[in-house]
Amino acid sequence: MINSYSLVRHGADTYYQIPLEAWRRGLTVTFVKDSKHFRISSGNNTHFFTGSALIDDELCLRAGQICHYKEVTKQYLSKNNVSVPKGKYFDHSNTNEEVLSYAESFDFPLVLKPTNGSSGAGVFANVKDLVSLKECLVYVRTQLNYKSIIIEERIEGDDIRVFVVGNKVIAAAKRVPANITGNGKDSIKKLIKCKNIERNKNIMLRKSPIIIDKEVLDSLKLLGYNLSSIPRKGEKIFLRDKCNVSAGGDHVDITDDLPDRVKDIAIRAIKTVPGLQHGGVDVMYNVDNSDNPCAVIEINSRAMICGHLYPWEGKPREVIAALIDYHFPESIPNKEKNKNLYFDFDDIKIHLCDWREFGNITNCNAKTEVTLTPPATNKVVAREIIVSGKVQKVGFRSWAQERAKELNLFGFAENFKSDKVRIVVAGDEENVLSLAKLCKTGPSKARVEDLVIKETNQPVYLGFYIKLNMIEYLRNESKIALRLIKQRIVFYHKQKKMYTSDL
């Protein structure tokens, strides 16, 4: 059964959005081994991806490795005269005392970060003195177990993520640290709660709320505040130093206002890495620094680019469409087709037994590849059919599912209010109207009193499924869990019998 919450769960997932865009255009999409590796094909044109990273050959894989290790990235950038922050790399053989000794030659504040971290883990962007640096070092190297680190100068300015494809900047966003704005009456704790409610409305940001932790409390303390403080109306308070969305930061689109010098350095940065055709470039930009306004902090070959689709502020950018345009230009005429069609990502994971989210299942009959069924090539229309009368608890949804499959239609049926069934269906227009005509009668136990049909732009999954309400969904999930438990018990007794049979 298709999970009706799949779009909400995976809408901000690069591993879902890129295959989805390709599939809608009629390209052949195959997931290989797990849900994070996929192949997209069009005739003889084939590319392999993991997320947004291209992994076609050894050169592409090496490009990914160069970007993964921040110190190696800096070496390539410096060699090609791309400005980077001054700093030094320290590996596991260097003691904390050596790091502290080197830091004394710099003016504080400094930046401390692991060479191979991601999503801001272990990054301290505003270390103010040696005492703080020592504490951060112990935390990063001992608790987070990042032995190799970089100490570098802190560059003031705007933190900008630029996404480049080929020789073109597709999108740019200013990354703003976690913050709240006072209204003159609510405490900081309540303002954080309200901000998280707003973030939860954004499909990208809902997974990254502002969490009240030691860093937030320390930041407030430095400003002379605590969670009970009430900021003035309009006063913006920054709760962290690092700008990562995963740490509660905001993603603000500035593509239309991006200075040419930032575009230029981002494009040049991508070109410095052999085999890298696209990626996210993190740039610090300080308009007041006339001598050196731009510096590249790092390059991300596997950038989580959905932030450009769902910014906190500003215009969404079609970064994934641009990626598919670049690698599959022959598909451009089809890019506007099937915009309201979706495939179920959880179903792919189940077939591949990619149980990272579902738990590990013993003796799973896993497939090594799953190729998506292509969407219809003819014109697809979508309609909403609402049937009223004695239509619940008479098998109307299951009946509609059977008729829809016979007519090669896809969509869903759900109970609606207390006396209605709602059917959202898409496919050939003649077949859609045929289903509507059949619904005027329905199954034998139903008594249809009214039927309304209208156009809809609602997202529709390939296949036809029964959409469950929350109670039905939980009951169904409980049945699945019980069945898996029974399977494990049977397996356990078989194993026990096999191993004790010779005793």
Image (spheres, grey):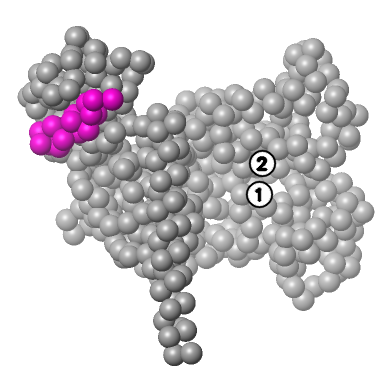
Q: Which residue is mark 2?
A: 247
Span highlighted in magenta in the image: 393-409
**Nearer-the-camera pick, 110 or 187:** 187
Nearest the viewer among 101 and 33 is 33
- Residue 232 at x, y = what percent? 81, 15
Across and down, in percent, residue 480 comes to 40, 49
Sequence-wise first label, 1 or 2: 1
Query: What secondary structure is marked by label 2?
Result: helix
Q: Residue furthest top?
A: 450
Whether 406 is among the magenta residues is yes
| Callout 1 touching callout 2 (CB < 8 Å) | yes
Relative image position of residue 267 (x, y in whole percent): 48, 47
Given residues 83 and 356, the one toward you in this image is: 356
Residue 33 visible to an observer of this rendering: no
> Percent x, y for residue 361?
44, 62
Residue in view at x 31 percent, y 43 percent: 1
**Looking at numbered disc 1 in the image, what kind of residue is underneath it?**
Gly
Could one spot residue 373 in this view of the protein? yes
Q: Residues within 10 Å of mark 2 (few under 14, many from 20)?
A: some
What residue is shown at x 64% (from left), y 35% (from top)?
209
Farthest residue to the bottom: give it. Answer: 502
Image mark for residue 120: 1
